[in-house]
Image (cartoon, grey):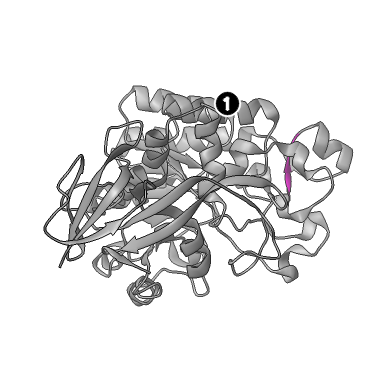
Amino acid sequence: MKRIFTDARLLLPGEEHPQTGSLIVEGEHIVSAAANGEQEGGDAIDCQGRILAPGIVDLGVFAIDKPAFRFGGITRAALMPDQSPVLDLPAMIKQSAAEGKPDLWSHPLAAATIGLEGTHMAEIGLMKRSGAKAVATGRQWIADSGTMLRLLQYCKSLDLALIVHSEDAGLTQGAVATDSETATRLGLASAPSAAEAISIARDIALVRETGAHVHFRQVTTRDGLNLVRAAKGDNLPVTCGITPAHLLLSDIAISDFRTFTRLSPPLRSETNRLACLQAVKDGTIDVISSGHDPRGPEDKRLPYAEAAPGMAGAETLLALSLTLVRDGTISIGRLFELLSANPAKILGVEAGLLQAGYEADFILINEDSPWQVDTRKMAAAAGNTPFDGLPVQGRVTAIYKGGRAY
């Protein structure tokens, strides 16, 4: 059945600003999306002048949390392999891929090593056949360079991106904060921010050897970003991401020992935060993701040093990211490259763009709608957000998967 979404402000590929027009869907795919496009010949849905954008593709979540994803406009989520049990077998991949259906595309990431222990490669080829769209090292960096080299060679042969965590565990072991005046004053175990740059430098050297695509899931320091920027200048196949927390908060946010600010990697200095904003602006950063990791009281209602890292980020991802648009850092077109198009490209799925032939996964947005982040009212499995009480603007008013509202 043909459906026409009229009076929409479309975020079209290559355009920085919304274009008034129509989107046409047949079955589960987009037929056309164009300014002043066709408006007859099918069931019409009036978008009432709202922004119609590609559904958000959240690259690297730690839980499939459908209520939170629906609130935040996330139509696809790449699930990290850090599950119980670890996603290191083909059967685990198949089971996890079915978890979000029918109202969410779940893309489980194959564990790079057995049990995510960093020593023996998992059966990546078999997991690709079972539906894995990329490979991930989980919350850990693979310290053994020989293992990492073989892993990259294998990923290259399978045409799979490797998503890595970038912190040298030899430096960060036992640390809960980044080295700074704040950590010293609070008496918290800390590690130098150089732990990130060291790990990135090693992995880039191995990318030069193998030609494999590495995605640095979160790069949060100026030195780390400079390494990625230089690698891109050499046309190496590297990409990197970040979360809104590392763009909008510095390590000062941990001053009251509030465990919702306990993240991995930890919040950085103001200098590094500003470097991250510049990297979003100049194109060094390719992806903004939620890092969604809902943690209950058993993990968070503890002394800061004992609390588990992680935040519930799915519901706030869009609203916080729109702050970058209102501040003039980037255009809304560029924002949806970061939220949708680029993560979809890394996963190799035909989504993330309002383009003919692509999956009809899209959202309607009221970019000016005000609301307040409230941990007590969040749809997520847990409300561990460092942005509790923050007034924000922008919310999803409708979400479509395969052209149908859910």
**Residue type indicated by callout 1:** Ala
Count of picture labels:
1
* Residue sitting at x 31%, y 55%: 46
Residue 204: quadrant of the picture: top left
Quadrant of the drawing holding the N terminus = bottom left
Q: Is residue 345 left or right of residue 225?
A: left
Q: Using the image as rendered, state which of residue 282 and residue 70 is in the foreground.
A: 70
Residue 219 appears in the picture as rendered? no
Kindly identify the residue that appears in the image at 79 percent across and 52 percent down.
258
Residue 256 x, y percent position in the rendering: 84, 47
In this rendering, position of residue 111 left or right of residue 353:
right
Image-based side of 330 in relation to 46, left or right: right
Dominant SS type (magenta) = loop
Quadrant location of the C terminus in the rendered image: bottom left
Query: Residue 251: x, y in percent?
Result: 73, 38
The residue at the point 46 percent across, 29 percent down is 330
Q: Is residue 210 visible?
A: yes
Between 297 and 75, which is closer to the camera in this rendering?
Answer: 75
Q: For residue 107, what is the image quadrant?
A: bottom left
Residue 146 belongs to magenta span:
no
Question: Could you say where residue 391 lies in the image, as x and y percent from the top left?
Answer: 67, 46
Q: Is residue 177 a member of the stretch shown in magenta?
A: yes
Which residue is more in the foreground, 303 or 119?
303
Residue at label 1?
Answer: 275
Neighbourhood count class around disc 1 (C-alpha, 10 Å): few under 14, some 14–19, many 20 upward: some
Residue 323 sits above or below residue 371 on the image: above
Magenta residues, as a range?
A: 174-179
Element type at marker 1? helix
Image: 27 above or below 316: below
Q: Looking at the image, which residue sits at the far left?
A: 41
